[in-house]
Each structure stands twice: as C-alpha cells, then as structure tokens.
C-alpha cells in the first residue's frame, strides 16, 4: 500500500563555511593588508506544501535529509557562497513534530509559505574583519557555525471539513461517490477502503471537503480491523457523520452501532466525541415503507438520548435523501466556517 501518512526523519542543516586568512600580495605593494573573506551560510531545511502530493511516501525510504554546507571564504575579500536551502515538498495538512519532545513545531497548511525546520550555520569571519589600528595583519578567522540537526516526525492530518465514520460496509464510500467527484472504491466486503479519500462539495458560493476513511469496528482502538490510525484524518473536521448500516443484522441496531463508533472515537487520543456529530442511516432502499416509517419514528428519539439531534435517512446507492443531507451540511459548514473566520 503506498499511502503513507507518518514518517520519521533526521533533518540536518548545512554548516557555515569557514572564514579565510589571506593577505594581499601584489607587485609593488609589499605589505598588503588582510583580505580573507567570510564563509557562506549553510543551507536551511525547509518544507513547502505541494498540492499534488497527498501522501508522505517520499519520506519512506530516505530518512536523513541534509542541506549543503556554505563555502569557505577566500582571498581578495571573496565571501564563500551560501549553500542553497533544501526544500522538501509535503502534502497540505502535514504536521511536523519534534520527535524527542513530541511538540508540534509547525502545522503546514498554507500553500505559499516556507516552513523552516532547521537553520543553516552562519559563515565564519575572514581575517580582514579583525584588522584594527593595533593589529594591521591579523591571522585570526572564525570557523563557520554548525547547522541545526533535529529528529522530527511528520504526520499527515488531512484538511477536511466533514468526516465520515462508520462500520465497514455502511456505505461511506458509496455516499462520497454519489455526492462528490471523488471515486473511492466500493465493495460488498468489509474494509474496501484502505486509505482516506477526500471529496469536494462545490456549491454556488462555497466549497468544502468530506473525508472518507476506512471502516471502524469494535476494538479498533486496540488494533482490531485497520485500527484507529486513520482517525487523524478527521481530527481537524468540524462535523462527523456517523454512518449507520440500517440492516446488517438484528444485533447491530442503530444505537449499538453509534455506541460502538463513539467508544472508538473516545479512545482516540484527541477524544473525537467532542465534535459535533450527525447520524446518517443508510440503505433505506432495502427497507419496506412500513419498516422505514417505523424507524423514522423510533430512531431520532433513541439517538436523542445519546445527545445527537440530527438524524438523516438516505440511500447512498439511489441518492434518495442525499440532497437534503448535503443542503443541511452546506448550511452547517458555512456557519462553522464563519464562526472560525
Ligand atoms: N442497497 C444499498 N446498498 C448500498 C448502499 N450504500 C452502499 N451499499 C452497498 O454496501 C456495500 C458497501 O459499500 P461501501 O460504500 O464500500 O461501504 P464503506 O462504508 O465505504 O465500507 P468500508 O470501506 O469497507 O469501510 C457495497 O456493496 C455497496 O454497493 C445503499 O444505499 N443501498
Ligand atoms: Mg469505503
């Protein structure tokens, strides 16, 4: 699988070049003064968001990234050249952590920004800098400063506004296929989706992003199924849609599925139950009208006891009910975004 959303790296900025010790030696100028130039600055290591990247795969095989050292200064007051910065492309939403302290160093979301993680050392001073009235011929210069070195961890946390959470087979990917141009694979077997997929909803005056992530099962926080590692991709969202399969089997009622999902969301490190969540009951095309009417009566009241007020009944396959859901989502996301602005 080539979707990589975590990487451990060592980044090394370049050392500064040494200052030079040199004296002018020209015909007819017997005692030329000092003319050793300064060393050049070492290169920084910089990260930059590239919208064409959506995984951290570039960092899977190479672990150490070093910028070049600055060049030494030389005679005739020539400064050494500064080394080029090493610029590494990352997907939007990559968070850079210090891998020792676990602190967030940078959260890389802006497109044109340069995110400098380690700075190159300054170049040393050449001997011409040390000339004074008392010392006309200094032999002193300084070495360049060492570049910074850091162990870091990159974590990709997708930038999505809405997250789809549900048991495998609930129809999350079918929904994203229906309402956006994203085309995640759909399958009648559990764990069809193995990596997050982002789909954009374009409305007349705004757009927002829905993330479809692999299905969650009971015990996911202990590693069951595909685990909970993909939850980081919905950790920035303002709203979760808890996708419920209306007819898997008798024991897996709507409320049981919601409880199981919420318990996994709660076990996740950032306790994702704090987010606003709506319930989406999917596959209504498989129900008789009577059964559907009965569920539309009973489910909202049961779900309300869990503190969730918004419940939608849809068929991701036929599209029934999806328009109302999208309209409500668009409205809600606009409110959330204007609150943030
Ligand atoms: N009848 C019916 N079938 C549906 C509906 N939505 C999804 N399905 C079917 O349910 C199965 C699972 O759909 P997916 O969209 O792959 O489900 P998922 O939630 O993405 O599953 P994972 O990726 O495994 O977590 C597929 O066979 C779909 O065709 C629906 O509204 N009605
Ligand atoms: Mg899927």
Image (cartoon, rainbow, N blue to C red):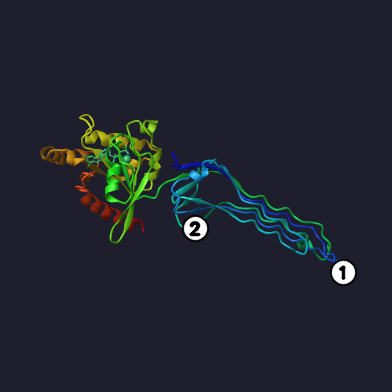
Q: Give the distance between the C-alpha atoms of the residues marked 1 and 2, in whole angstroms.
A: 51 Å
Q: Residue at x 22, y 29 (%)?
A: 251
Which circle marks residue 113 in the picture?
A: 2
Q: Quadrant of ligand 2?
A: top left
Q: Is residue 267 left or right of residue 21?
A: left
Q: Counting other residues with Cα less than 10 Å from the Cα at mark 2, is it few (<14), some (14-19), or many (20 or more)?
A: few
Farthest-out residue, top? 251
Q: Residue at x 85, y 64 (%)?
A: 25
Residue 311: x and y in percent read 21, 44
Residue 221: x and y in percent read 38, 33
Please say whether residue 119 is visible from this viewpoint: yes
267 or 240: nearer the viewer = 240
Please say whether residue 97 is visible from this viewpoint: no
124 or 132: nearer the viewer = 124
Kindly identify which residue carries mark 1.
Answer: 29
Q: Counting other residues with Cα less than 10 Å from the Cα at mark 1, is it few (<14), some (14-19), or many (20 or more)?
A: few
Q: Are marks 1 and 2 in contact (CB under 8 Å)?
A: no
Q: Residue at x 34, y 44 (%)?
A: 184
């Amino acid at each position: 699988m080539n979707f990589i959303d975590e990487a451990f790296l060592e980044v090394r900025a370049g050392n500064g070049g040494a200052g030079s010790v040199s004296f002018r030696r020209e015909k007819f100028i017997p005692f030329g003064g000092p003319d050793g130039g300064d060393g050049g600055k070492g290169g920084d290591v910089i990260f930059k968001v590239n919208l064409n990247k959506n995984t951290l795969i570039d960092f899977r095989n190479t672990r150490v990234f070093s910028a070049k050292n600055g060049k030494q200064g030389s005679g005739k007051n020539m400064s050494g050249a500064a080394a080029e910065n090493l610029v590494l492309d990352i997907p939007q939403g990559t968070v850079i952590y210090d891998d020792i302290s676990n602190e967030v160093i940078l959260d890389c979301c802006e497109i044109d920004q340069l995110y400098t993680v380690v700075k190159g050392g300054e170049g040393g001073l050449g001997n011409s800098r040390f000339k004074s009235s008392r010392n006309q011929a200094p032999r002193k210069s300084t070495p360049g400063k060492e570049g910074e070195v850091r162990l870091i961890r990159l974590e990709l946390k997708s930038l999505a506004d809405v997250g789809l959470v549900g048991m495998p087979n609930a129809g999350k990917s079918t929904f994203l296929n229906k309402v956006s141009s994203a085309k995640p694979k759909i399958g009648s077997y559990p764990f069809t989706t193995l990596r997050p997929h982002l789909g954009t909803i374009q409305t007349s005056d705004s757009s927002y992003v829905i993330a479809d992530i692999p299905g969650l099962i009971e015990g996911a926080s202990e590693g069951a199924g595909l685990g909970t590692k993909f939850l980081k991709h919905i950790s920035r969202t303002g709203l979760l849609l808890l996708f419920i399969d209306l007819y898997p089997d008798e024991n897996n009622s709507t409320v049981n599925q919601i409880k199981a999902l919420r318990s996994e969301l709660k076990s996740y490190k950032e306790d994702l139950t704090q987010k606003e969540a709506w319930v989406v009951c999917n596959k209504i095309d498989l129900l008789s009208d009577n059964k559907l009417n009965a569920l539309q009566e009973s489910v909202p009241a049961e779900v309300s006891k869990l503190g969730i007020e918004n419940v939608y009944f849809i068929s991701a396959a036929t599209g029934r009910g999806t328009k109302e859901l999208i309209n409500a989502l668009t409205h809600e996301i606009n409110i959330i975004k204007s609150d943030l602005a």
